[in-house]
Amino acid sequence: MKLSFQMIDPGGEGLLLVLTPVPREEYAPLTRRLLAIRELSPRQAAFLTAPAQGGVARVECAAGGCGGETLRQAAFAYAVQAGIRRERKVPLEGAGWPEPLAVHVNPLTGQAALDLPLPQVGREPAQVTFPGAVAWAVEKGAALPPEEALLATLPALAEEANTPAAGLLAWDFRARTLRAALWQAQGGLTYPQRCAAGAGAAAAWQALRGGASGRKAPVHQPGGELHVTATPQAGVLRRLTVEGPVDLGPVYTIEF
């Protein structure tokens, strides 16, 4: 099989986006082989495929759901591959998300902004849920709990929220630093270095506690900074957008 893929965000999430159509049953073995390419040191792989829900394209992952940051970056890569040169809204489907998500891409500036669906936000316990996609528990602080504690609580959170994924966010809202842990039934426990859905969830929780006024604000993560706009009105969230740069690497074509 001749496979074309593009390296995205090598200093952060290290995403290999596969551009060649691939049968779904090949996702898992191909992902293992792609992640073993030592010269590129990828952290994850995703597959760009034909849309099924009205988007321009669809992104799928061997682990099941694809994170918001994967969709934000994949939309930018798709736009560049499609010859889009100016700012454009790209509706992109993602495995694990009930509906296509709008991504505003601007190849001239290297930026992409993801419009997240408005989540359900609980105060006690602090929980932010994107229905049908992912539930986040939010803890104040700078450090994540040990792995055994995460594995003991996150599967139960996913079951309770009826979502395919669940995560925990260590959110220092004064320093605006965020660390994320994410559990998926097929993918197990991972630690996203730059998480768009997690950044949006933390900002949404803070906004509804009176800690934001709808202005764009940074969220610092190990894999780089994202800017989030969380706009509340009368105690209800009206807008949630996550924006940041996209670092596109070269496109490789190899024989597998």
Image (spheres, rainbow, N blue to C red):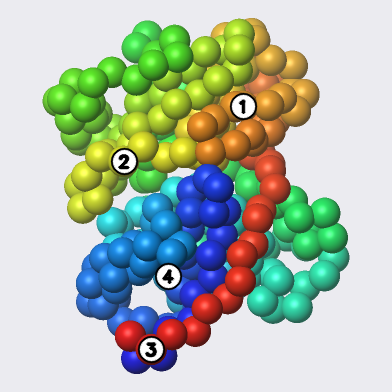
Left or right position of 22 against 188: right
Image quadrant in which the N terminus is located:
bottom left
Residue type at mark 2 is Thr
- Numbered tag placed on residue 190 in the rendering: 2
Kind of element beneath mark 1? strand
The amino acid type, in three-letter code, at marker 3 is Glu
Q: CA distance from mark 3 to mark 2?
A: 29 Å
> Where is residue 248 drawn, in percent x and y?
64, 62
The residue beneath circle 4 is: 47
Q: Secondary structure at mark 4?
A: strand
Residue 185, given in percent of the width and then of the height, sits at 20, 47
Identify the image quadrant of the C terminus.
bottom left
Residue wearing tag 3:
255
**What residue do we see at 65% from left, 55% from top?**
247
Q: Spatial distance from mark 3 to mark 1, Cα to Cα?
A: 39 Å
Give the Cα separation between the discs numbered 4 and 1. Answer: 27 Å
According to the image, label 1 marks what residue?
219
Q: Secondary structure at mark 2?
A: strand
Front-most of residues 225 and 42 = 42
Q: How many marks?
A: 4
Q: Quadrant of residue 169?
A: top left
Q: Earlier in the sequence, mark 3 or mark 4?
A: 4
User: Which residue is depicted at the point 37% across and 9% down?
Assistant: 124
Residue 63 location, quadrant = bottom left
For image coordinates 26% across by 77% down, the residue present is: 26
Q: Is residue 13 visible?
A: yes
- Which mark is in front, 3 or 1? 3
